[in-house]
Image (tube, helix red, strand yellow):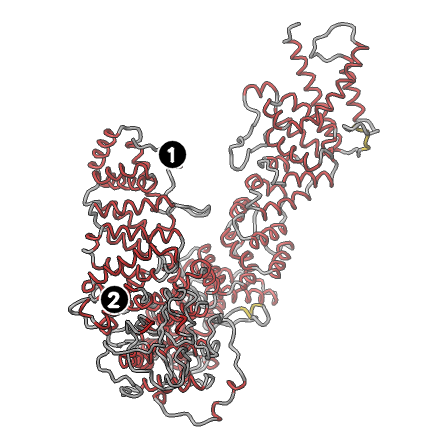
Amino acid sequence: MYNMQAEKSSYPRLFYHSSIEWKDDTEEKFERARGVLQRLVGNLSEREAHDALQTAACREQKVHDELCLGLIANILTDPNSSTKCFRDLTFLSRESLNVAAEHIVVIAAEKYQKLTDVSRSQLIWVTKELVRAGANGMEAMCWHLLRQIAGGDISNRNLWLAENMLELFIENRAWLEKLPFLIASVIFTYLRILEDHYVPQLASLRQKEINFVVSLIRDKFSDCVMNPNIGMGRDFLRLLQCVSRIPEIQAIWTDIYYNPKALSPHFTGINQLLNVRTSRRYLQLRLTPEMDKKINFLALQVRFGQHKRYQEWFQRQYLATPESQTLRADIIRFIVGVIHPSNEILCSDILPRWAIIGWLLTTCTNPVAAANAKLALFYDWLVFDPKTDNIMNIEPGILVMYQSMKPHLAITATLLDFLIRLTQEFWPAGNGKIREGIGSALRTILEKKVVPSLEPLLENPKLEPDLRNAIQDNLLILLHPKWEGVGDTNTSNNVNNGSSVSESVVHASSGFPSINVAPVTSPAKDPPDSLQLNYSVTPPSPGVLLSPGIGTAAVQSFPISVAVTVPTATLIGSDPVKGLASMVPQNNKFENNTISFIQDDASFSDEDDEDPGSGTPPKQNALAGAVPMRNSPTLGTSVEEAERSKIFELVQQLPTNFRMPLDRMLDSSDGDREDDLDEILEECAQQYDKEIRESISKSLVYIYKSELNKQCYDESTETVLENIEISPVSEIITTILKQKPADKSGRSKNLFRLLADVINSVPLVAYKILVILGQKHNEALDDDNNTKLAHFPQLYKVLCSTHRNLKLEQALKQDLKACWEAEPIVLGYLCQFIYNWFEDEMQGQAELLRIFMSALDPAQLQEIVWDVSSGTYVMMDSAFLTSVLNKAVEWESWEQHCLWSILMAHPFSAEDYLPVISMLDYRHHAEALTSLLLILCKEDPSEKILSPCLCRKPNPKDRFVTALLMSWSMSHSEESVSGIISALLVRAYGSPTKRKRGTATGGRGTGSPAGPSQPNVDYILGHLDILRIQMKEEGIFCTDIMLAALLQVQSWATDSQKSKYKDLLALAASEETADSKDFRSSSKRTITSRRPPSSPTPTSSANSINSSSKEGSSSSLSRTRSGRTRQTVKDDSESSSGDDDEIVLRRNTKKRRKTALNSDSD
């Protein structure tokens, strides 16, 4: 039988959830399927359940799918019944388990990170079972699970997944060998993570991975590695390079270089693999889906200048550990090869790719990982062919160097140095091939105008002289189309073979102790046990970089990164991490891997600032014919010129009355466009053709793009700009305001449509319209022109509702969010206008209110409080107060502080806040409770206020109620506070008859999350017990009213209550003992006949009456528990307390008479 409960809450958890996350469609679908399965077979025997499943599945396809989904949910959450559920699933499912496969693929691709540990383990188990069962779609399932194996992560969960997937492939090797793409993905994944598994604790797992990957490479080299349709390409060599010191991998390198036919009869060598571009599917494979989403969001949606907090979050989440340094190369390859933004994004202010890559490079603290990251950036340059390769693959590399020249010249110098070394040392045997690829990349960059000119980069006078000479000798000559043979010292014709390698050559490998770098200088100048960086043009020693069996160096890996200064003897057999030499040239003062990218300007020495013209005249080189430098090279000029050409074509198609002024505006400066713009607006007011109007709006947006992107906030004065003018928006608004905004004539409609078209092209203009209208509103106030004040909000309303097709609330939300993202400080300025113009529409809009609260600074908050206190405008109506406060408790602390400061400026009464008190939690809603306490402490004590406060669940750590009562006790008389508490306590108990019929708790009961609607006895006693400890049994506990109430409670309380609150009730017990002694001594003198035990004597009744009258006399002396007398103030509250005391005593008397009638003596 399926041992499950009927309620959803009893199901084992499939996914982890935080307190603020909602279940998505996938999770809801699983919950519904579980319910369907439970209702069908929940209480049946195994045979009956089997028949019921078969019958239901045959009725309808939808039921069949839900039952399969329910069985999958049980498999993933209950290991004990998983075997039986899978058997039922295979029996029930149609079409080779397609439904089951589809759903677990979705889980692996989208929900894996949210799965519980049990569910992850079961997911691997069911995947193995489905693979054995031959289910369709398991190739995609395994590919998505491989994506979840993160690089640079040696946590237990990641290692567990890598090991279990490896076992799956080993156990199902025959199935795997039928899937070439999956084989290539497995090779690509495990070659990459081998680099991370160098620690001794992972030796067993590492060896298992090595044996499996090497066997796959050798057995399936032709089908996977060489196959261009599979597309592993040149990045296979890059990954193989990083683990080249492993003996088994070393053997593969030997065959690739010396005996390629041993791997495949059709394999010719390294050149064949380098010419194949790696498919983006493999680059995407090495980032988890979560990383993929974050990087795409950063590169395609975050604005430049607002990226820092996102980068810091990503750094903390994925790049915080020492092992994660190797992940940077994977991210850079993903950005270069996968993320190719559109021209629209390139022309926008979205964070460019080069800025993200620069941040990754400069925050890398491991020099070996930094060198591999640079290699990942320039890898497509090495064999770049403009006919087959994409310009977007080399664009980030040149822009990182180009954009860093002024703020961070050290970054530019480091990357230029690295690029020079690639031309010389990456592949000495194929030096000509590499130089041809890099030269082709540089020439294509100039042809496509990715940057206006390379001269500022390659002939920068602030670079070190040695570096400038090296650039001249190694890069500038590559720009000439006839460079072949110039500076190429490699005479070998066969790029795949070579004869020897210098023993002092080492190569940087981030995972294993192997660093191979061909020496730049002549061996005669440098000692044999050390490598020195030198920008000499002396060619390296002839030979190849890979040469197995050379002395003690064993094997030198294939491609190289940079030259380093380190004794080669220390690299052989050293620690995999500590033995790795710095990839940074030791005598290059520009190298600094800890520079903070795009933050501070680099400072240079006096020598760097000398006039470059004072030396020898510059040499004529290939840069002489380059495009002249422009003022702003941030965007490629090719995009800018293409846009201008498109606008020019649009203008030429317009009628003459539009074309002529637009032509003049395209050719004139900003100051000469005013008359032409007025002419265009006058013509637009008469024009009804939609296509013409849209062409005009696009032309105006292009002409005034700098104006439209202008900021409203002046950072120098820290205020919003006065009399801000944003052409052509300001002119259009002025023209509309000359008429009435509500005017429905054709002139106004056309101008509104033109303004809406401008907003559609530049959405940020919308909030600037509000700023302009606000300033015009202030100008009208200064001129005492009150008749115009209604026009400004009316203009915005008509624009949104009629021409933007948005409701006012939607438009405000959209525009204010845009303002918050672009210029949050401007929201403080807009607040007064928004709540003045749209007071009714803004009431209850918690989301819009939060936007304002999050953007305010202290000075703006002060201004708003002043305005609200003086009644200038209202930001909150009491009808919406409760609903807004319920949402506001989840806001940030500063947002809540601003909200409560503004609420206190409104004329709300304390009663307006009472509905939310019982729902607040002291641990999570401290801001709201603190503000409420300060408000209530200023009020006079009353049952109306105290009653909802006592509905809060008593907790010794929650001091809200005790703090309020103690504050009232100090600022008012203790008797008045005691009287209120006593009245609530007696009311909570009610009459004895009523208590026998029901419970003593009252209200909604203690089970309600928000507490009872009225305070019950347990809640009141709980709060009093906490207060007793705080006040040390003094204060209100010494008053007769409180003692009398506690005495009465003691007679009504249940045994559990007496036990729970024994210390509190003991205060009344001592008082009762003293009264009893006085009562017995009086009775012996006055009683002449035997009376029922519970019946009060006349004397005692008289004494009670006398006591009551004395308590109300002018002497105002009250007796305390210690026997002392205390002078009290006689006021209204004391009188009411005395009345309550008399009521309590009369109730006690009535109770005794009733008991006497039912006694045995009666």
Quadrant location of the N terminus in the rendered image? top left
**Residue at coordinates 36% horizontally, 53% vertically from top-left?**
159
Q: How many numbered marks have been drawn onto this rendered protein structure? A: 2
Q: Secondary structure at mark 1?
A: loop
Q: Please name whichever residue, 1152 or 451, is drawn nearer the observer in this view of the structure.
A: 451
Label 2 Cα crowd, 10 Å radius (few <14 / some 14-19 / many 20+) = many
**Residue at coordinates 50% horizontally, 63% vertically from top-left?**
770
Label 1 Cα crowd, 10 Å radius (few <14 / some 14-19 / many 20+) = few
> Disc 1 marks which residue?
7
Tell whether 1041 sits left or right of 319: right
Q: Amino acid at mark 2?
A: Ile
The label nearer to you, 1 versus 2, is 2
Residue 1119 position in % (x across, y down): 79, 27
Farthest-out residue, front: 551
Q: Please name whichever residue, 99 or 634, is drawn nearer the observer in this view of the structure.
A: 99
Q: Is residue 484 above or below residue 113?
A: below
Quadrant location of the C terminus in the rendered image? top right
In space, the residues marked 1 and 2 are separated at their CA atoms by 59 Å
Residue 252, disc: 2
Q: Please name whichever residue, 108 or 1045, is drawn nearer the observer in this view of the structure.
A: 108
Q: Earlier in the sequence, mark 1 or mark 2?
A: 1
**Residue at coordinates 46% horizontally, 82% vertically from top-left?**
672
Q: Secondary structure at mark 2?
A: helix
Residue 625 position in % (x across, y down): 35, 88
Q: Quadrant of residue 745?
A: bottom left
